[in-house]
Amino acid sequence: MTGKFFKQLSQDLTQLLESEYDCNVVIEVGEKPNNKNFKAHSAILYQRSLYFRQRIINTKKKNNIIRIELPYVTVESFNIIIKYIYGGVISLEDFEPVAILDLLVRVNFFMLTELVDYIQNYLIENNATWLQSNFFRVYQLNFLHDNSFNALQKYCSKTVVKRPNMIFDSDHFPTLQENALIALLKNDNLEMEESEIWEKVIQWGKAQTHDLPENLEEWTEDDFMILKESLRNCLPHIRYFQITGEDIIQKVKPYHNILEKNLWDDILTKKLAPKTSIKSKILPPRGKASSTTAPFSSIITLQHAAEISSWIDKRSTNYDVSKIPYEFKLLLRGSRDKDGFTAEKFHELCDDIPGTVVVVKINSTKEILGGYNPLKWKVGAEDFDETDDSFIFSLKSENRDRSFLSRVSDKSKAIMYSSNQGPCFGGEDLLMGNVPKSWHSGKTYYEEPIRDKKGWFNVDEFEVFEVCKDD
């Protein structure tokens, strides 16, 4: 048996840093007048950070002291980093997400790979709502730093496939890095019409090119050549042959001068005579991802989906968002014209489907409530069905700092079927009334209530997902 005493080792090394005993490195951090000198030990810096290893090797000593200047690093962030280098401990609970993201960039600068991975996972697991609200910034970050943030990139890739407009419709879209745009264009699963993608690429290209006339009729041949040069790395990834004939004429033709002549001729040929062979390469149509763990939801985030999936599997820890084993298939959304908020529509769209998640949102309180039913919903005469795998929940939101799970306590009355109501968990634990948007929460056959107040309330959105194992 091997004894491990890492806690005491961490404390001892942290005390060594604070004591400044036998330090032989002085690190000047920040710019005057907000700079600060940190004293450290070359042996520890050399071993713990590849960045410092290179600096120590390449810096000449003066009076046996190595001096390193870091003017573009803040004192606050370096204080956290140097304590991690010595003690291997970091706490992020008191930091805002934007500060954590900035810290991630600094940590990557010092080549602290283990900490880079930890911070990424912390953001994904604890700040999913913020990540989605600041999605453009997070998506672009990895491309600005040589693909160093793999976990965040996987998180963003899963989201952007289902919701590409989070990038394309952003006010910051014209500033998107070219390599980030190309990564989008090369994605075979991007759920967006090809003609819309073409329009966005043209918009981006114009933004990279100054002094182009606003009126296209005033463009010269040189203007088209300038735009063509700006887009030369993007144009090969457009699926031209998947664009409808009408959109070819209305959207592509006005800019056809930026395309190679043989490509434009082949596009027209294929639209006029589809069976005619051509020389241009035909890229495959973009298709929906064969399996996606990102719910196309106006209520829940990827983090919520990971949490719910963990509860379904009765795990003690949550799944990473990149490893969710379920696909969330949207069956009903109340705000869609074809769906609505009635119990009748719920039964029409959701009955006889095993394994469903129901979620509702209350805008007035920012609450997100819901439940999981492993059985099939059906119309019944106030009868119950038995399962010990169902549960109800309140999810982390703007006004709730953590999610709350309540499992069934009387499995014989886990699910109730009604002739005039929608989904009903227990007796009155969580149920949809027979009046549109009217729901009830209380405590009968589940462990704990999921709302502080018992009674009826109105919802602003309502969604039901079929939860399928992602093979």
Image: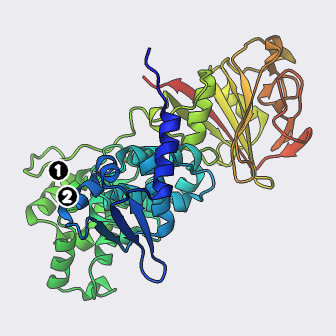
Residue 157 can be seen in this image: no
Residue 356 can be seen in this image: yes
User: Is residue 296 toward the left or the right of residue 41 in the image?
Assistant: right
User: Is residue 446 toward the left or the right of residue 122 in the image?
Assistant: right
Q: Secondary structure at mark 2?
A: helix
Say what amino acid the circle numbered 2 marks.
Answer: Ile
- The residue carrying mark 2 is 57
Mark 2 Cα shell of 10 Å, populated few (<14), some (14-19), many (≥20): few
- The residue carrying mark 1 is 273
Rendered image coloring scheme: rainbow
Q: Secondary structure at mark 1?
A: loop
- Residue 14, image x, y percentages: 49, 49
416 lies above or below 421: above
Q: Earlier in the sequence, mark 2 or mark 1?
A: 2
What whole-number distance in Å separates the C-alpha atoms at marks 2 and 1? 67 Å
Q: Nearer the viewer, mark 2 or mark 1?
A: 2
Residue at image position (59%, 21%) is: 313
Q: In terms of depth relative to the viewer, which is nearer, 104 or 26?
A: 26
Residue at image position (34%, 49%) is: 44
Q: In terms of depth relative to the viewer, which is nearer, 249 or 40?
A: 40
- Residue 51, image x, y percentages: 28, 56
